[in-house]
């Protein structure tokens, strides 16, 4: 008999939005909902309609959404102490969202009921039971989020079970067990979840973990192995404090490793693009070290590793990159062999051989640039452009005539720099100017403003990371610097490099490569 399906429950737009530095507009939320639905997520918890005007507006626009896989869930709490659910304003807001399903959180830790809600244990059970029964009477599918369940169980197992019993009596379709403080270990999660499954046979069980011990993914997987059939989490693990359980790791762990159906198999290859899309919309740097969906998840540097992967990828890869929509990266460095470099050359010129003039010319140019301070292991964009230049397969998209950068200090409004630039494109000169928060920011804005008339696709890209390293610090202010710029669009990210004794000049070369790579990518 096959194992039951595990329903992926995404709370990026609610719990994820509680992360420091994360804020989603209504349009952001709608874009992410479409991506999550395309991925095959079963439930999307989209916010609390009673908490703020932005969520109210989002739920008003729900009628626009034509979803294929997902149910939208509105989130709220049980009725207030002593209140009749029918008279509770927060529950009225929840119903006004017109979602097919709702999630209600309630206290299952006796300490929280008495010390935080400041009510009796009996009244807390009444609030849970009556709230869920009221929502069920309105035709809603109800998920009960058993807040602090694992801590509550460890403190008073009998009362925590009574709280779940009240939810079941009220008619809850699923009881989601929450490791709200993120302090439980996998063995605890497994044992307690198994005890719940035994106590409430036939009741759907969910798991909601936080990552305060870096165990949220492991805990979620163990809960499923103990009987949970719903897994709550966020894309990229964003969330309050240390974050929520990361669905981008949980989904492939369950589906590719344990054979549990979570999303349609054909959709697994969209996982990495969705993860990067959410990072882009959230305006955060995508985690290169993330399992499955990070840029480094299938990156190989050491010569022995690279040689083995080229012979058989299973030697150093536990799944294939394309199975999760990612790609293998062979990093260029002083420890990479000629075969590694040849592999990158063949991406541009398939006819190249180990000893061909093309390969020798690229290796000589690589040695020359590394001697000058370049390092291409994390600058794959510039490395590909360098290969194209050496092989005569590169045509500049524009020519620089001149640029000027002015820095004004002190700056009363935080915009302390301006840049003027003149470029030549297809027989035309274009002159533009821009202000910025620093000279590089001003130069970046002026350059793109000059080129967007000719290349509208440049409106899609943005600079997401900027790193500077001093190469020879003994030279003090005359030292060479290495600048790395990471640029992204909605589908991909790439890194480019510039080296110079002038930080603005080094930044300029990295900026130009970033734009040339984007335009070359389109032509490919």
Image (cartoon, rainbow, N blue to C red):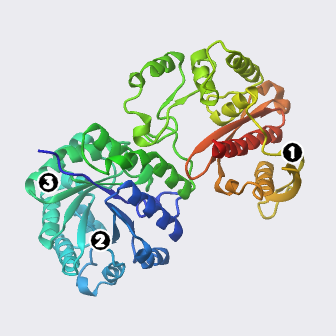
- Residue at image position (27%, 44%) is 221
Can residue 189 be spotted in the picture?
A: no
Question: Seen in the image, is 103 located left or right of residue 28?
Answer: left
Residue placed under numbered mark 3 in the picture: 196
User: Left of 83 or right of it: where is 502?
Assistant: right
Distance between mark 2 and mark 1 Cα atoms: 57 Å
Quarter of the N terminus within the rendering? top left
Q: Which secondary structure lies at badge 1?
A: strand
Q: Is residue 157 above or below residue 302?
A: below
Quadrant placement of the C terminus: top right
Label whose residue precedes the other's in the sequence (2 or 1): 2
Label 3 or label 1, whichever lies nearer to me, is 1
Badge 2 marks a residue whose secondary structure is: strand
> Which of the numbered marks, if any, corresponds to residue 400?
1
Q: Nearer the viewer, residue 350 or 15?
A: 350
Of discs 3 and 2, which sits in the foreground?
Answer: 2
Q: Which of marks 3 and 2 is nearer the N terminus?
A: 2
Q: In this view, does 243 lie to the left or right of 261?
A: right
* Residue bearing the label numbered 2: 102
Kindly report the distance in space between the C-alpha atoms of the residues bearing marks 3 and 2: 22 Å
Query: Which residue sits at x=36%, y=78%?
Result: 97
């Amino acid at each position: 008999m096959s194992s039951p399906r595990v329903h992926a429950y995404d709370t990026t737009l609610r719990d994820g939005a509680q992360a420091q530095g994360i804020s989603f507009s209504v349009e952001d939320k709608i874009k992410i909902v479409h991506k999550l639905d395309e991925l095959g997520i079963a439930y999307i918890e989209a916010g609390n309609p009673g908490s703020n005007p932005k969520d109210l507006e989002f739920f008003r626009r729900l009628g626009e959404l034509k979803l294929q896989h997902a149910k939208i869930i509105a989130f709220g709490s049980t009725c207030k102490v002593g209140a009749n659910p029918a008279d509770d304003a927060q529950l009225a807001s929840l119903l006004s969202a017109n979602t097919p399903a709702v999630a209600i959180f309630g206290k299952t830790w006796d300490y929280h009921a008495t010390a935080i809600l400041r009510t009796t244990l009996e009244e807390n059970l009444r609030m849970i039971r009556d709230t869920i029964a009221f929502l069920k009477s309105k035709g809603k599918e109800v998920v009960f989020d058993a807040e602090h369940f694992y801590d509550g169980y460890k403190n008073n197992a009998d009362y925590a079970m009574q709280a779940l019993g009240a939810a079941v009596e009220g008619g809850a379709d699923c009881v989601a067990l929450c490791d709200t403080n993120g302090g439980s270990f996998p063995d605890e999660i497994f044992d307690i979840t198994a005890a719940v499954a035994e106590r409430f046979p036939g009741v759907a069980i969910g798991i909601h973990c936080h990552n305060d011990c870096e165990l949220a993914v492991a805990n979620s997987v163990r809960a499923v192995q103990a009987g949970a059939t719903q897994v709550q989490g966020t894309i990229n693990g964003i969330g309050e404090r240390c974050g929520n359980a990361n669905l981008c790791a949980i989904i492939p762990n369950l589906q590719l490793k344990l054979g549990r159906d979570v999303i349609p198999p054909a959709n697994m290859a969209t996982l990495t693009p969705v993860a990067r899309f959410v990072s882009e919309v959230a305006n955060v740097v995508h985690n290169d070290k993330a399992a499955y969906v990070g840029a480094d998840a299938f990156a190989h540097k050491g010569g022995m590793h690279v040689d083995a992967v080229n012979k058989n990828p299973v030697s150093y890869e536990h799944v294939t990159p394309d199975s999760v929509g990612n790609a293998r990266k062979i990093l260029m460095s002083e420890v990479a062999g000629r075969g590694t470099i040849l592999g990158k050359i063949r991406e541009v010129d398939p006819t190249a051989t180990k000893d061909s003039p093309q390969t020798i010319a690229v290796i000589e140019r690589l040695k020359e640039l590394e001697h000058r301070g370049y390092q291409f292991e994390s600058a794959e964009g510039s490395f590909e452009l360098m290969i194209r230049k050496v092989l005569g397969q590169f045509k500049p998209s524009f020519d620089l005539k001149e640029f000027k950068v002015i820095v004004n200090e002190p700056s009363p409004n935080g915009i302390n720099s301006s840049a003027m630039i003149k470029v030549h494109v297809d027989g035309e000169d274009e002159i533009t100017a821009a202000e910025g928060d620093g000279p590089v920011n001003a130069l970046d804005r002026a350059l793109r403003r000059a080129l967007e008339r000719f290349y509208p696709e440049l409106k899609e890209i943005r600079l997401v990371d900027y790193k500077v390293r001093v190469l020879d610090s003994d030279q003090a202010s005359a030292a060479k610097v290495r600048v790395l710029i990471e640029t992204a669009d909605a589908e991909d990210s790439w890194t480019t490099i510039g080296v110079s004794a002038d930080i603005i000049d080094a930044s300029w070369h990295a900026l130009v490569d970033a734009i040339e790579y984007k335009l070359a990518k389109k032509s490919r």
